[in-house]
Image (spheres, coloured by chain):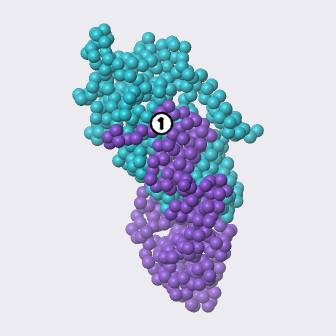
Chain colours: A purple, B cyan
Amino acid sequence: MDPSTIDILSTKDLTIENITENVHMINSRAEDPRLKYVLERLVTHLHDFARETRLSTNEWMAGINFLTETGKICSDVRQEFILLSDILGLSLLVDSIDHPKPPASTEGTVLGPFHTHDAEHLSAGDTIHTDPDGEPCLVLCTVKDTSNKPIKDVNIDIWETDSKGHYDVQYKNRTVPDGRCVMTSDEKGVFWFKAIVPVPYPIPHDGPVGKLLVKLKRHPYRPSHMHFMFEKAGFDHLITALYLRNDPYETSDAVFGVKETLLIDLGTVSAEQAKQYGVKEGEKLITYDFVLVSDEEAKKLREEEAMKAMKALGRRMKLYEGLPVPDVD
Amino acid sequence: MDPSTIDILSTKDLTIENITENVHMINSRAEDPRLKYVLERLVTHLHDFARETRLSTNEWMAGINFLTETGKICSDVRQEFILLSDILGLSLLVDSIDHPKPPASTEGTVLGPFHTHDAEHLSAGDTIHTDPDGEPCLVLCTVKDTSNKPIKDVNIDIWETDSKGHYDVQYKNRTVPDGRCVMTSDEKGVFWFKAIVPVPYPIPHDGPVGKLLVKLKRHPYRPSHMHFMFEKAGFDHLITALYLRNDPYETSDAVFGVKETLLIDLGTVSAEQAKQYGVKEGEKLITYDFVLVSDEEAKKLREEEAMKAMKALGRRMKLYEGLPVPDVD
């Protein structure tokens, strides 16, 4: 780079007091207004964090090492940064911001680090597990829009652990997906499958995030749940899960995912259902009616809430590609 | 873990508004008051950042991927997280907070990611470089305390790039350290050596940090400088560098390290000096008198400034192992 082409910004003699405005100044030439705003907020919070804690060099280095270890342990089947975001409540927060839900719709929750893209596409009534030790559970669901109209052809990702509380990807010898599938809703918005009763399990805690939990005297458990993800053009992407009521970890989920509206009671398969769905009478049963929000509804609500929040913060903002940026005109 | 041993905190039904206090609550059982305070501030800033930007899921995922890549590229000889901290001004800020300097002492600056622990211990007058293309430069220094008394037996790490602007560790075929050494000051506080005239160079910009700089339209250059690190029991660890005045990047250092008091003018070796130090007359010359702060002076100043800053923030704090924590008694 030819130094003569650099238009010089003076960022010399920086101190505890003036460093932040100088970093903003040098970052202010970014073209994307959204990147500029996000960076401006990031740098402000990062610096305020250091100033408010009087962060020591040793603590800073501990942070550098923590982040480095967190990155190093990530692999194709392990995402420790998502786990970190989960246990700090950031994942739940971002999902709540980005996927606002009108009252009648199904709430979202954390994605977690165990979704994969290689799940098999199964047909209605198929079994998603090969685990012989899991307690069989029939799952009968529908998916509708906010006006109670069934939605067909929704792609639904479903994933849960085996009876030992491990996802397939946590086994080193995994060759094919297990305990997960993709289904499509039918004309009546129905999808159903055979699974096992979810069990509580600890998030992976042999890495940096697990060590942090120990220091914070926090347990690593998640209450029993089954993950669902819904995708269909025209509808807001829904990442959610169903939780078994009265699980011992119901109120202390390590990743803050539980919501009252997502709690379910395990039912029992009736004689009639047993016949209809080809399972045993008395088997465990999960039923749930999911409600998706249209893209338009979600966009409208997201933008309204964003502008309302910016106003409450006293910031003069406008929307840029649906997200707030400073209104400098 | 036996669920019955868990004393339950209810963290259910979390929303954009109440998630932060709930994460604080679940983290509040950490025993170390400093860890508890640092985490409380970290979570507050992380959540406020997401709320103030209305961070989208896509942006969050971009952040997760950025951090993962940053971790992945780290190695024994590359620390991309330090580089990230450097280009965001955090490193300079933390050094300023942790190593306060009374007016008469030498200011600190960024460590950077290129210090190693394998530099050879050299004697006064030795040459720290094998680079035949570097412009020879005699470096004559002293190290004193704030009452102008020479300090002997200080261990001084010195490191600089070669004439091409690369540190030894940036060469894949590096077998031994080059362009770096450790020296010890003599009875008069003197240390001197033969080096090469520093040149400007880009920080490594082929990784995630480099990509971020491009998006921010920032150049990756550092002005010409030579690193120094001082260590002696009883004195505050000093990490600093000397910068050549009028370097094209003097006022736009990619990592915000330049300070007026650390700028030097390249001198010229006189006939007398040439004879005394065994170099050629007219060769380039760097002279500098470093002033170290005692541990006691640094501790006193650090604690005073910490408490002053806490007071300015309106926080009722006390010191715990020299660092502020909430005063809850």
Residue located farthest toward the right when viewing the structure as drawn: B329
Residue at 40% across, 41% down: A7
Residue A271, above or below A196: below
Q: Which residue, given by chain and number where applicable, does mark 1 sit on?
A: A11
The residue nearer to you, when weighing B228 against B177, is B228
Q: Quadrant of residue A222?
A: bottom right
Residue B59, above or below B234: below
Residue at 41% across, 45% down: B218
Secondary structure category for the residue under label 1: loop
Residue A260 shows in this picture: yes
Q: Badge 1, how many Cα within 10 Å: few under 14, some, many 20+? A: many
| Coordinates of residue A270 in the picture (x, y in percent) | 63, 87
The chain that hosts pointer 1 is: A
In the picture, measured across the screen, residue A112 lies left or right of residue B194, that is right
Residue at 45% across, 26% down: B262
| Coordinates of residue A278 in the picture (x, y in percent) | 54, 88
Residue B213, above or below B8: above
Q: Tell me the quadrant of the picture where the C terminus of chain B can be found.
A: top right
| Coordinates of residue A104 in the picture (x, y in percent) | 65, 76
The residue nearer to you, when weighing B145 against B28, is B145
| Coordinates of residue B278 in the picture (x, y in percent) | 27, 13
The number of discs equals: 1
Residue B193, above or below A65: above
Q: Quadrant of residue A283?
A: bottom right
In the picture, measured across the screen, residue B101 lies left or right of residue B8, that is left
